[in-house]
Amino acid sequence: SELAPPPERVVAAVEAAKGARLTAADLAAQSGVSIDEARRGMRELATALAGCDGVSVSASEQGDLLYSFPADVRRELASRSAAAKARDAWNSAKPALQTAGRFAFGLALFASIAVVFTAITVLTSGGDERDDERDRGFGGGRDRSPFGF
């Protein structure tokens, strides 16, 4: 079974580093995620890209893990993970889908207003014709009942 892709913010921060060596603290500062989330995300990314050229993990003199990833980490991840490929496809399609959704909502709102306006116009004009008939016909208007009979 395929592992879930690392969080998008982690991938974006690693991609912005353009192949530089990073610690979890570096990544957390750059991406705005917690250090624990940065550690977990870098570990998931390194696992997903295991065996890829440019991926390495080493220890710094202070004992921190230094991760190095290829400069085009997103392309490498997409080539190895269907979930990452689907996420990238969704992220590229999302703006167009949001625009289409807003347009469809606006169109539906306009159509419903037009239908309600038309219905009100038809109902009010239909009542005028019946009033005219009552005034003109059936007994010449004499002895009219207040109930319209």
Image (tube, rainbow, N blue to C red):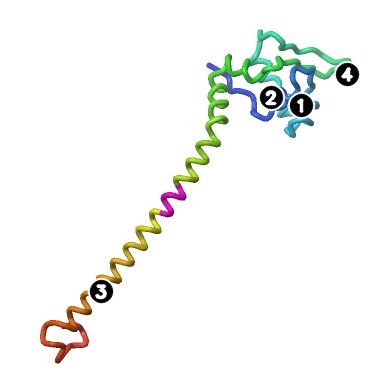
Label annotation for residue 127: 3
Mainly helix, strand or loop, the magenta region? helix
Q: How many discs appear?
A: 4
Q: Amino acid at mark 3?
A: Gly
> What residue is pinned by disc 2?
41
Q: Is residue 11 left or right of residue 61?
A: left
**Residue 77, above or below 114:** above
Q: Are marks 1 and 2 in contact (CB under 8 Å)?
A: yes
Label 1 and label 3: CA atoms lie apart by: 72 Å
Q: Mark 1 or mark 3, which has the lower sequence index?
A: 1
| Picture quadrant of residue 40 | top right
Q: Mark 3 to mark 4: distance in Å?
A: 88 Å
Q: CA distance from mark 1 to mark 2?
A: 10 Å
Looking at the rendering, the stretch of residues picked out in magenta corresponds to 105-110
Q: Which residue is mark 1?
A: 27
* Helix, strand or loop status at disc 4: loop
Q: Residue 53, image x and y in percent? A: 69, 8
Discs 3/4, front: 3
Please tell me how crowded label 1 is: few (under 14), some (14-19), or many (20+) other residues with Cα within 10 Å.
many
N-terminal-most mark, 2 or 3: 2
Which residue extends farthest right?
A: 61
Asked if the magenta segment contains residue 146, the reply would be no
| SS at circle 2 | helix
Direction bottom: furthest residue = 143
SS class of the residue under badge 3?
helix
Whether tag 3 and tag 4 are in contact, CB under 8 A, the answer is: no
Q: Position of residue 8 (x, y in %)?
A: 64, 28
State whether residue 6 is above or below residue 122.
above
**Residue depth check, mark 2 versus mark 3: number of the one nearer the observer:** 3
Q: Earlier in the sequence, mark 2 or mark 4?
A: 2
